[in-house]
Amino acid sequence: MEQRIVTPPNSSYSIVVFSPQGRLDITTAWQFRLKLQECIENTTPHIIVNLGQVNFIDSSGLTSLVAGMRDADKVEGSFKLCNVHPESKLVFEVTMMDSVFAIYDSEEEAINAAPEPMTF
C-alpha cells in the first residue's frame, strides 16, 4: 500500500494519503486499520484514503474506515475518501456510508478540501 505525505497549498499542516490496492476485506482490513491508527497517533491526524485501486470492500473494510474516521475526529483531524472505485461505490451506497464519509471525486479535490486545524 502506497502511503505519502502531502501539504496543501497555503497550509500549515500535512496530510497522509493512503492508496490501498486490491481488496479491503477481512484478510487485509485489520492491518490497514493499524496503519491508519499509527499514522493518526504519530504522523498527522489528517488522512485521505484514495480508493481508486480497491475493487472490493466488505464490512471489515468499512469498519476499518469508520474506525479511522473516529480516531481522526477524536484529535480534531480530518478523514476523507476519494476516487472510490466503481466496484466499491455500490457498497457505500447500499450501506448508506456515502452519507457518513466525506467522499471526493479526485485526490486533488480531497487535498484542497482538507480543513485547517483549529488553533486557540
Image (tube, grey):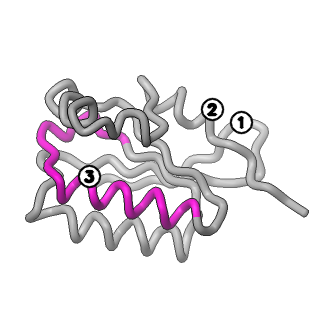
* Number of the front mark, 1 or 3: 3
For the point 42% across and 71% down, the residue is: 37
- Asked if marks 2 and 3 touch (Cβ < 8 Å), the reply is no
- Asked if marks 2 and 1 touch (Cβ < 8 Å), the reply is yes
Q: Amino acid at mark 3?
A: Leu
- Asked if marks 1 and 3 touch (Cβ < 8 Å), the reply is no
Q: CA distance from mark 2 to mark 3?
A: 24 Å
| Magenta span main SS | helix
Magenta extent: 50-73
**Farthest residue in the left direction?**
27
Q: Amino acid at mark 1?
A: Pro
- Residue 8 image point, x, y percent: 66, 40
Q: Secondary structure at mark 3?
A: helix
Instruction: Examine the rendered structure and indicate whether residue 115 appears above or below residue 28.
Output: above
Q: Which residue is mark 1?
A: 9
Q: What is the quadrant of residue 95 in the picture?
A: top left
Q: Secondary structure at mark 1?
A: loop
Mark 2 / mark 3, whichever is N-terminal: 3
In the image, 8 versus 105, the foreground residue is 105
- Residue 22 image point, x, y percent: 13, 45
Q: Which residue is mark 2?
A: 112
Instruction: Examine the rendered structure and indicate whether residue 85 appears above or below residue 69.
Output: above
Q: Amino acid at mark 2?
A: Asn
